[in-house]
Amino acid sequence: MTKRYGQNTVVGGLTFTVRSGTVTGFLGPNGAGKSTTMRMMLGLTRPDTGSASIDGRPYLELRYPARHVGAVLETSAPHRGLTAADHLLWIAQSNGIARKRVGEVLEMVGLTGAARRRVGTFSLGMGQRLGLAAALLGDPPVLVLDEPVNGLDTEGIRWLRELLRRMAAEDRTVLVSSHLMTEMSMVADHLVVIHRGRLLADTGMSDFIRRHGRTYVRVRASDPQLLGREMERNGASLMSASDGSLEVDGLPAAEISRLATANGVLLDELSTHTESLEDTFLELIGKGARNTGV
């Protein structure tokens, strides 16, 4: 899909598939085009070229959309004068969903006690839980969630994480965007990464870290200058860390240990590290910006 506003290309030739049975993390910096892409998926924004389909059909062709797709978008908000129960009830009635399901999803998201409260009195976290209740109302096989953890407390984030994993285990399709990299690393099986509306990566979580992340060896030694020279002679590149240790790229820990022993250098630390999802993501985004001249 492609979407332009004037001369600004928000989404440019973006193509990817979200598969069932997995939680797919949708990552990109602010302004990358994630929300616009999700809105095009749900028929709220018309692409200039291309299309999106859900189980082979455009969203707007679904007769009862809430029974096919559950969505939480940052820009969506219920009428502030409605109670939580009434907000869910009109969605249920318009989608052929049994009335009793309203109470079930309110209990599921922890809002049973607030069912008769007006939405305008809700905190940010309660509003987010209500949005998730609406997304779950039709027991849909597909979930599309834009920043669903916003406003949730620690307990709520843990509950959402377990929910998403359970949905994937039931062979549902889950697409979730988030700026919380630590949380995404705990829940996502697959990653789709975009920058300036273009695809940078579409791969499994572990493969993403392996291909784009940095693995290095941290070394503390009795004679770091001597050992450093020997490691560089053997093809390593070194970087001094703020704590006085050396970060070594290009040599495995076993080879560094051999060099230290051969040169009579005592090792106080020798450990292998792989960058976190956040570090890897930022590095990939930086490469994407350099490659596009941004």
Image (cartoon, grey):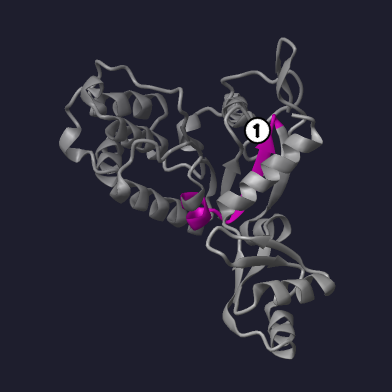
Q: Is residue 226 magenta?
A: no
Q: Is residue 241 visible?
A: yes
Instruction: Give me the residue at 63% from left, 30% from top.
Output: 32
As drawn, 232 above or below 154? below
Q: Is residue 16 visible?
A: no
Q: Position of residue 239 (x, y in %)?
A: 68, 60
Q: Nearer the viewer, residue 119 or 200?
A: 200
Q: Residues within 10 Å of mark 1 (few under 14, many from 20)?
A: few
Q: Which residue is mark 1?
A: 57
Q: Position of residue 45 (x, y in %)?
A: 60, 19
The span picked out in magenta is 183-197
Q: Position of residue 52 (x, y in %)?
A: 67, 31
Judged left or right of residue 84, residue 28 is right
Label 1: state its secondary structure. loop
Judged left or right of residue 150, residue 255 is right
* Amino acid marked by disc 1: Arg
Judged left or right of residue 119, residue 60 is right
Examine the image and state in which quarter residue 110 appears: top left
Q: Nearer the viewer, residue 213 or 136?
A: 213
Question: Which quadrant of the rendered structure holds the C terminus?
Answer: top right
As drawn, 236 above or below 71? below
Q: Nearer the viewer, residue 187 or 99?
A: 187
Q: How many marks?
A: 1
Q: Nearer the viewer, residue 190 or 256?
A: 256
As drawn, 150 above or below 77? below
Instruction: Give me the residue at 40% from left, 41% from top.
Output: 149
Instruction: Give me the residue at 36% from left, 48% from top.
Output: 157
Instruction: Give me the residue at 40% from left, 24% from top.
Output: 94
